[in-house]
Image (cartoon, coloured by chain):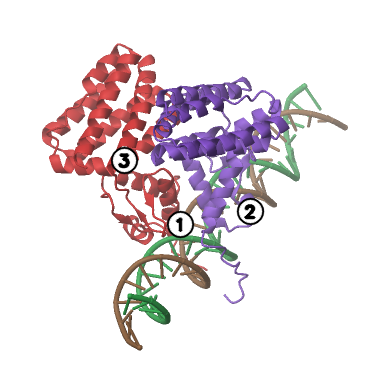
Chain colours: A red, B purple, C green, D brown
Amino acid sequence: MGETAVAVTGAGIPAHERVYRRLRDMVLFGELAPGQPVTIQGLVEELDAGMTPVREALRRLTAEGALDAMGNRRIAVPVLDPAALEELTEARIALEPRLAARAARDMTAERVGGLRDIDDALDRAIARGDVGRYLHENHRFHAELNRFADAPILTALVDGLWLRFGPSLRVVCGQTGTRNLPDRHKDLLHALEARDPDAAAAAMQADVEQGMELILQSL
Amino acid sequence: MGETAVAVTGAGIPAHERVYRRLRDMVLFGELAPGQPVTIQGLVEELDAGMTPVREALRRLTAEGALDAMGNRRIAVPVLDPAALEELTEARIALEPRLAARAARDMTAERVGGLRDIDDALDRAIARGDVGRYLHENHRFHAELNRFADAPILTALVDGLWLRFGPSLRVVCGQTGTRNLPDRHKDLLHALEARDPDAAAAAMQADVEQGMELILQSL
DNA sequence: TCACGCAGAATATGATCAAATTTTCCGGAG
DNA sequence: CTCCGGAAAATTTGATCATATTCTGCGTGA
């Protein structure tokens, strides 16, 4: 068919991967509101991609629980009810303290330093009331910590959980601002520095409980 | 384009869903060996489906961890190393006992009866040395139990874990037969009947530990 | 109120392009 | 003369797109 428009194949990364990462961030950091419908053609226009890559990215996100596939082939951002939130809390408490304990086991001074830097940036974001930045740094803190746990399967499970409450967390922060967001990362950093798995697990559980309680209060 | 063959659109279920379920079962019950490459075009011929539905099903399975996407756009059945198996064990122990406890909370006589029926069928499969049937009934027992827990998110997580060790479990059973497969479901049924969450959780943990130990021994 | 059709969106197909693996073939070293 | 790399053709496989087909939802009119 001669001169097919043929956008120059971007870089090495496939289009469906690029769309997936973009959409993932949109969910994770609350650029999409809970309940908001997500259409293929809408994404095709907005992200300027083909239909097939968008389709595949959506399929992947729904498989991870980041998006909700209604029976009648519509897709929407999940709305959390109290029961779902309770489940998410139980799952996080079951998994994330174990990751923190693993990370504590072979923690290094350099790693603690990196985490402390992220936590400082997080504090500054809170002080400035920069909600978006807070969400990013908070996620980066946990993602980095999980990376140190060297447990890809457990980490994948937890990443999926974060995708599920990302949109709702954004709503909470949008309502209350960053005022009431004391971070419990200080105890955690202390436990990590001491390479104390049990203390790290306990601190992580406290952080999770507090964060989820915050979401629960906003129903 | 005139006379395209036009396969009669099956029933209400979409093609990609049908392909997904089929592939999921193939992974779950070990019809695919660990390490075996999975190609799109191969599935297209074998399952007699279009390319797009197969693609989407594969994307979904890889997102769930049931299949492994190598860097160079190839897909294969994951091979478990000891580290991965240890992670899977930790994840199962973190999650499945909690599901058992939830199921125990509002257990009914009818539900226990259903589970006992499945367990009987499981015993008969062991006695006959019917590996395939054993795997199916064992999965059905746990799936049914998880259904009673009424916790869709936790159940989805656990289903993903089962997909990860399905192929390897099949290998183990294929090697050793059903001889050394005593099922720990008796204690579990007893605890469920008594509606004792803690006892159910403990029994489930024992079942998980034994099952994973079996896989570990085969490396 | 309910049936019917119409618009719009999702699903599925086959063609086409790009990338990676496999095969083949050749030259040099032993 | 045989055998072992290594490069390049050839084949297989994956990615993307344009398009046809089907389904869902909604508005319209009886």
For the residue pair D6 and B155, the one nearer the viewer reads as B155
Callout 1, which amino acid?
A: Thr
Residue in the picture at 34% in, 40% down = A163
Indicate the chain on which mark 1 is placed: A
- In the visual, does A208 lie left or right of A177? right
Q: Residue furthest front?
A: B109
**Circles 1 and 3: CB atoms closer than 8 Å:** no
Q: Chain of mark 3?
A: A
**Where does residue D18 sit, x and y in percent of width and height?**
47, 68
Amino acid marked by disc 2: Leu
Q: Is residue B157 above or below residue A107?
A: below
Closer mark to the observer between disc 1 and disc 3: 3
Of residues A93 and B70, which is closer to you in this image?
Answer: A93
Q: Is residue A59 left or right of residue B212?
A: left
**Residue A52: mark:** 1
Mark 3 falls on what kind of element? helix
For label 1, the SS is helix
Residue depicted at x 57% and y 63%: B10
Q: Which mark is residue B88?
A: none
The residue pinned by badge 2 equals B47
Q: Is residue A178 above or below residue A24?
A: above
Q: Residue B200: x, y in percent?
A: 45, 26
Q: Residues within 10 Å of mark 3 (few under 14, many from 20)?
A: few
Disc 3: which residue: A83
* Spatial CA span between label 2 and label 3: 39 Å
Q: Residue at x 30, y 46 (%)?
A: A26
